[in-house]
Amino acid sequence: MDETKVGSNKSFGIVFFVVFLLISFYPLLNNESIRLWSLIVSTIFLILGILNSSLLSPLNKLWFKFGILLGKIISPIVMGIIFFLVVTPIGLIMRLFGKDVLNLKYNDYKSYWIKKNGPKNKMKNQF
């Protein structure tokens, strides 16, 4: 399996600094007081992120594994939703109108070869 590299502790610390900083200042939008606990946590993440501390390594790896797990769960769900909401209705509509875009219907032809008219190639002015 392809091993994906975990991001640096510095970027991890700075990202979580911004996240907890936003959480601490969010109550200001509703005229409430700042969340002090979140401001303290964001400051700790900033200091550890700037120092590129090895204390962030376990959290960084845990966050990375959580992202991989989410990708394994969410991707099939999203692809299933796209398939059943986009591809399936288009296929049903095409069947309803009798379209055979891939020419899959059985014919009694001797050959399924399609005779082309016009020039044999269109390689002029490729670039």
Image (spheres, rainbow, N blue to C red):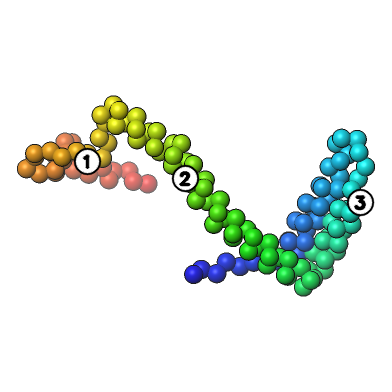
Residue carrying label 1: 104
**Depth check, front residue: 124 or 6:** 6
Task: Give the SS element for disc 1.
Answer: loop
Measured Cα–Cα span from mark 2 to mark 3? 42 Å
**Depth check, front residue: 119 or 56:** 56
Please provide percent x and percent y for residue 28. 88, 39
Give left or right: position of 7 versus 75.
Answer: right
15 lies above or below 30: below
Circles 2 and 3, Cβ within 8 Å, touching? The answer is no
Within the image, what quadrant is residue 95 found in?
top left
Measured Cα–Cα span from mark 1 to mark 2? 25 Å
Please provide percent x and percent y for residue 122. 26, 42
Task: Give the SS element for disc 3.
Answer: helix
Dot 2: few (<14), some (14–19), or many (≥20) neighbours within 10 Å?
Answer: few
| Residue 36: mark | 3
Dot 3: few (<14), some (14–19), or many (≥20) neighbours within 10 Å?
Answer: few
Circles 1 and 2, Cβ within 8 Å, touching? The answer is no
53 lies above or below 123: below
Please provide percent x and percent y for residue 25. 86, 44
Disc on the earlier residue, 1 or 3: 3
Give left or right: position of 67 versus 124.
Answer: right
Residue carrying label 2: 80
Residue 92 seen anywhere in this rendered image of the structure: yes
Residue at 16% x, 36% y is 117
86 lies above or below 60: above
Disc on the earlier residue, 2 or 3: 3
| Residue 16: mark | none
Residue furthest out toward the left: 110
Tell me which amino acid carries mark 3. Answer: Leu
Disc on the earlier residue, 1 or 2: 2
120 lies above or below 8: above
